[in-house]
């Protein structure tokens, strides 16, 4: 029997055995149970789902003192970051409670009958409903915020969908602990424990994507892993939406003006963004576009000093450490490394790694684009460009990314406009004068982008609108009012914003 | 060279040669041009796109007297139906003009900066933008409404996306004529002619789906054709959304009470819906659930008489005629045909076909589900059920459909509720006391459903929200206000509804 063990990345030691790998039969049973649970959860009114989400948030907070040390033992991310991440996770649950209570997300739309039309138009009412049970693949780098109780799960529950989470192998003990808490909250709220399922092991993940009860999947992870599972989802006899957020290079551009004016400030800011969480963010700027010339030389010099001055830290797992070393080797092979990257080599069983800045010029990158590949961890590639045209060429050569960031003077309108237009086509978030790491959970957030940043550019995996991924429309034609979903009943008992005969009607207060 | 010929289905004669099959190189050139055109169209303000859509509608109306006879010659659908369909098509273009002018469809969302938050939150503004050039596959059965100027094209143009349409082989001359009109309108409005491209031939269709410039595809047609192209779209190195509406069985349920109370009215209504457009609607009720017992016997008797009394009519093409005959043979083989289906056999080169009603009982269907397959054309299968449980079992056995219709007495609340709950899971539109054919173009319409009704249950191919298929989100962080898309500028120059700091703000008037 394959066992799932919890490994301390600081030592490489197996600390405990968490579970056995989940068998195909067990995955099937969990998915069946999740379908039944979706029947219950999907039929609840949004206010009840909001209560559930808030109660999960509260219970996670109540268990903070046990969960954070456990997360730290499995991720080595440190308590400060993990406390912050848990807060972000519970805030996210509470935001989604607000979003479903506000109710616009269900897009309730009513066209009253028009007997005078040619042909006569029947009464037609459309609303978004739960798509069905959702498979969720937790990420290694956010053991709270993109894992069992993370964004995919929170948005699926908000939509009325039960989830079966495939626990990430880097934090199985934390995953089990969080799932246990969530299941207890579900039961306490009169919902099936199976509203939150949990599976372990790679084979279980593949079975999950192929299970006939699963109707959508949320995934955060590598491009290769995401694509493999995406292909399984598409090859089903009934293909399902597979939402993979697969990371990216996140080009960050410094204009000649900015390099000259804000050398020190930019060096510190970029170095901080590259090494935040020891570079283990999908929004880490992996390609830094720096102008040729003296100002760029000075910036690069300061940036190299700042990055290589960062103290070695532990990476999330030995797998990520090994992949990081391979990525650094690739950078060293394929770029002219004018500044010696100190690199980092395995030092025994732990995952300690040093930060790296490689550099090259635009012509080299445009000649051999293989270097434009994400290196997950504390590494970045500085690319020098001679002029605006070359800058744009490199930007077009970088595969579509989650973010593009630009540091320029407000007066450089020509440059800003060109970058905006290219970036709008090739990314999900365009940042001006800032850094891409740090993805606030709010109404306007977008965390996505054209392939390979994500498998489906139409949706976000962070923020209020991520709920839309797990909803599908149903229209009711001439249906008896009392038997319509409450969102569509004439009297609007939920008090939500609706579009009625083409006109957006605002929310109205509902008596308790 | 393969030539594209226009065939008259009434005679089987080739009337004219329209074009050569479009070569792979020509498809690639059209897609490149569509990418450039999308750069222009996508950057226009919604009001300008609305003008374009309205001008196309006007120009199609102006050419009505030429287009309708041409459509009739290629489809044999008759001038009355085709005049109505053209009106529906131009109304659809005008609705989408209204939708983009109203502007909610762009989901403009603004979260102002909050320096007091932990961590400080930057200014973040999200809007939906054109996804890129769209491939459109016209359908045989709606030469206007689901073809070159149909719903997929109209919604793509509304979203700011240029299109390359793969003309349906059943109406190539009409496709060429409509595309010519649309391209002339584009040029007259200062937009590239290549905003509307047109390709001919099956190979061109496959090249279109695989072209790297194409970023989404809308398709209406058969399940086998749709799935084949869906698989190509998913297998791309950069998979793209493929929206296929693939038709369905559209179960229609008659309760025991309704059968007794409204025998004559139901027989006429169902027969009319089955044979409307000679059964060539994707919403044709293909499975009619009729109760066992005397009331059901009477209804079936009257229904059979009504359907077989329908005069033979011409089908759209010889391919559809052949598939229809195969489908009827399949029905005759696998159901106990208690009432002789008169069927219909090829009579020379034309596509004349008679309407068919086959029948069987629920137990037979549940034993051999192969009969639950769409037969495109004027055929339906009546299935007798003994009780509510058996009815629900059959409903669960029918593959997910575009629609489910229920005729029941208002007092049969238990039945209505059960059908509603199953149908909500398994269909896109639930009709009470009516018929599924006739899909009004409005704000609340939903034309979709779980696979195999469509390849992606999240979206509709008819109605205001179909535009969402061709939009993707982009967020601008801390971006200079004057260089933001107008939808996101602080002063709201478009006057559209927006969500600001979590609160939905209504539209406001804009000075001209």
Image: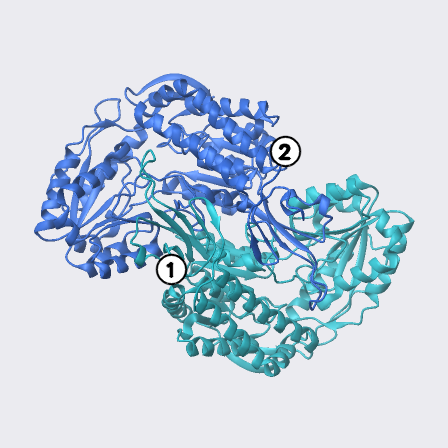
Chain colours: A cyan, B blue
Measure the C-alpha gap from mark 1 to mark 2. 43 Å
Front-most of residues A104 and A62: A104
Residue position marked by numbered label 2 in the rendering:
B40
x 86%, y 58%: residue = A339
Q: Is residue B47 left or right of residue B322?
A: right
In the rendered image, residue A271, in percent from the top left (x then y), is placed at: 79, 62
Front-most of residues B315 and A335: B315
In the rendered image, residue A475, in percent from the top left (x then y), is placed at: 37, 50
Residue position marked by numbered label 1 in the rendering:
A486
> Comparing marks 1 and 2, which lies closer to the viewer?
1
**A447 versus B129 height, above or below:** below
Q: Quadrant of the C terminus of chain B?
A: top right
Q: Chain of mark 2?
A: B
In the rendered image, residue B360, in percent from the top left (x then y), is placed at: 16, 48
For label 1, the crowd category at 10 Å Cα-Cα, with few meaning under 14, some 14 to 19 and many 20 or more, is: some
Q: Is residue B509 left or right of residue B430?
A: right
Q: Is residue A231 left or right of residue B426?
A: right
Q: For residue A73, which numbered disc appears in the image? A: none
Label 2: which secondary element: helix
Front-most of residues B61 and A373: B61
- Badge count: 2
**B329 versus A39 height, above or below:** above
Label 1: which secondary element: helix
């Amino acid at each position: 029997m394959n066992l799932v063990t919890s490994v301390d990345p600081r030592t490489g030691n197996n600390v405990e055995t968490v579970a056995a790998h989940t068998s195909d039969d067990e995955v099937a049973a969990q998915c069946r149970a999740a379908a039944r649970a979706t029947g219950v959860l999907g039929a609840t009114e949004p206010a009840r789902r909001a209560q559930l989400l808030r109660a999960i948030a509260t219970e996670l907070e109540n268990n903070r003192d046990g969960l954070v040390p456990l997360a730290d033992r499995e991720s080595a991310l440190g308590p400060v970051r993990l406390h912050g991440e848990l807060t972000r996770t519970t805030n996210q649950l509470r935001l989604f409670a607000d979003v479903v209570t506000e109710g616009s997300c269900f897009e309730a739309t009513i066209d009253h009958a028009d007997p005078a039309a040619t042909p006569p138009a029947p009464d037609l009412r459309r609303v978004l409903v739960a798509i069905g049970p959702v498979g969720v693949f937790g990420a290694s780098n956010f053991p709270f915020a993109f894992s069992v109780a993370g964004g995919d799960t929170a948005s699926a529950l908000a939509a009325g969908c039960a989830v079966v989470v495939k626990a990430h192998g880097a934090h199985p003990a934390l995953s089990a602990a969080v799932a246990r808490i969530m299941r207890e909250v579900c039961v306490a709220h009169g919902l099936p424990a199976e509203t939150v399922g949990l599976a372990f092991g790679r084979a279980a993940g593949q079975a999950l994507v192929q299970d006939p009860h699963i109707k959508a999947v949320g995934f955060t992870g590598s491009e290769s892993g995401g694509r493999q599972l995406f292909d399984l989802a598409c090859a089903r006899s009934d293909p399902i939406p597979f939402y993979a957020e697969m990371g990216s290079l996140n080009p960050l551009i410094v204009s000649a003006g900015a390099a000259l004016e804000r050398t020190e400030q930019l060096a510190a800011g970029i170095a901080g963004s590259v090494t935040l969480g020891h570079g283990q963010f999908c929004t880490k700027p992996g390609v830094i576009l720096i102008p040729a010339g003296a100002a760029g030389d000075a910036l690069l010099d300061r940036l190299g000093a700042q990055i290589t001055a960062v103290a070695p830290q532990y990476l999330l797992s030995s797998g990520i450490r090994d992949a990081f070393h391979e990525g650094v080797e690739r950078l060293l092979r394929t770029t002219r490394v004018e500044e010696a990257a100190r690199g980092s080599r395995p030092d025994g069983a732990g995952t300690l790694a040093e930060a790296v800045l490689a550099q090259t010029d635009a012509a080299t990158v445009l000649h051999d684009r293989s270097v434009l590949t994400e290196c997950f961890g504390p590494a970045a590639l500085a690319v020098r460009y001679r002029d605006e045209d070359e800058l744009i060429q490199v930007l077009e050569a970088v595969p579509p990314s989650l973010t593009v960031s630009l540091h320029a003077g407000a007066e450089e309108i020509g440059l800003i406009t060109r970058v905006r237009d290219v970036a709008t086509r090739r990314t999900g978030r365009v940042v001006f004068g800032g850094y891409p790491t740090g993805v606030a959970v709010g109404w306007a957030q977008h965390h996505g982008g054209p392939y390979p940043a994500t498998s489906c550019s139409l949706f976000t995996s962070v923020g209020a609108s991520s709920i839309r991924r797990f909803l599908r429309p149903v229209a009711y034609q001439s249906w008896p009012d009392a038997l319509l979903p409450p969102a569509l009943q004439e009297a609007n008992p939920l008090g939500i914003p609706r579009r009625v005969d083409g006109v957006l009607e605002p929310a109205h207060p509902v008596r308790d």
